[in-house]
Image: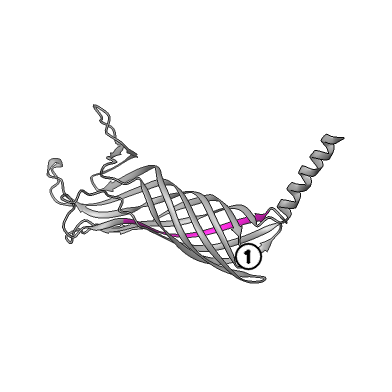
Amino acid sequence: MKKILLISIIMFSIITVFAQSPWWFGGHLGVNFNTVTGQYNNDDDIKHTFITTPMFGAIAMYSVNDMISVITEINIAKSGATYKYDYNDETRNFSEAVDVKYKECYTILQIPVLAKFTFGEDWQYFGYGGFYWSYILGGKYKAESENGNFDGKIKFGDYPDNYNGDDMYLDKDYNRRTDIGLNIGGGVQKELGPGVIAADLRFGFGFLDSNKWPDDDKPDDYKAYRNFVIGLNISYLINLGR
């Protein structure tokens, strides 16, 4: 009898907490358009263009009140860009420079923390902003030219002894694996079933240069290579108290 009473008290307490819960949980998916900004020097003629990649993740949102919420996310996304440039390598007996299209695409773990402001009643409008931290899990590259194509994985570390493959190894002393940046965006949402469905447009601006340069090695007129992303997302959140 005492066990039944204790279990009943615990269950009643849990139901009471969730009935008054300001927490929302759910997930989102979308498509990102990624590129990088930057220039090695004023003579650099490399053109940076966008790559299109998927994104998905989990969301937890705490409602301070009907207008203000705090969001944290755990996302698996992509970063990178496509580079177009002329390439001339005398060791390969190129008679003239060839056009090269080079694509880098990294898989990243990203954790944003955002403040959200919501307005309206039936159809609601919201804006948000905050910071993110990201970490590169791995990557791939692909190079295309009239002289041939090649591709491989991108890894961080030293090249293995007697290496003769196509994989690329990035020196951690000169290449940054983490990034910190700003996310801003906004969208619309509406109640649907037990939760809320939302669509939003997001802009991400990286703060950190993906290259690490000792002061005496940095080229003249160098401009930092920073990540930039435009994202279109669909999300669905459920309030545990409903």
Q: Residue furthest front?
A: 2
Q: Does the magenta stretch mainly form a helix, a strand or a loop?
A: strand
Q: Residues within 10 Å of mark 1 (few under 14, many from 20)?
A: few
Observer-nearest of 1 and 92: 1
Amino acid type, label 1: Asn
- Which corner quadrant of the image does residue 107 belong to? top left
Image-based side of 42 in relation to 195, left or right: left
User: What residue sits 50% from the left and 60% below the top?
Assistant: 232
x then y, percent, for residue 91: 13, 41
Q: Residue furthest top?
A: 162
x then y, percent, for residue 189: 61, 65
Give the residues drawn in magenta, as a range. Answer: 226-239
User: What residue sits 53% from the left and 58% below the top?
Assistant: 233
Residue receiving disc 1: 65
x then y, percent, for residue 85: 23, 55
x then y, percent, for residue 4: 84, 37
User: What residue sits 33% from the left and 44% below the top?
Assistant: 141
Image-based side of 215 in relation to 181, left or right: left
- Which corner quadrant of the image does residue 33 belong to? bottom left
Q: Quadrant of the N terminus?
A: top right
Image-based side of 40 in relation to 142, left or right: left
For label 1, the SS is loop
Q: Quadrant of the C terminus?
A: bottom right
Question: Residue 11, relative to residue 190: is it above or below?
Answer: above
Q: Residue furthest bottom?
A: 120
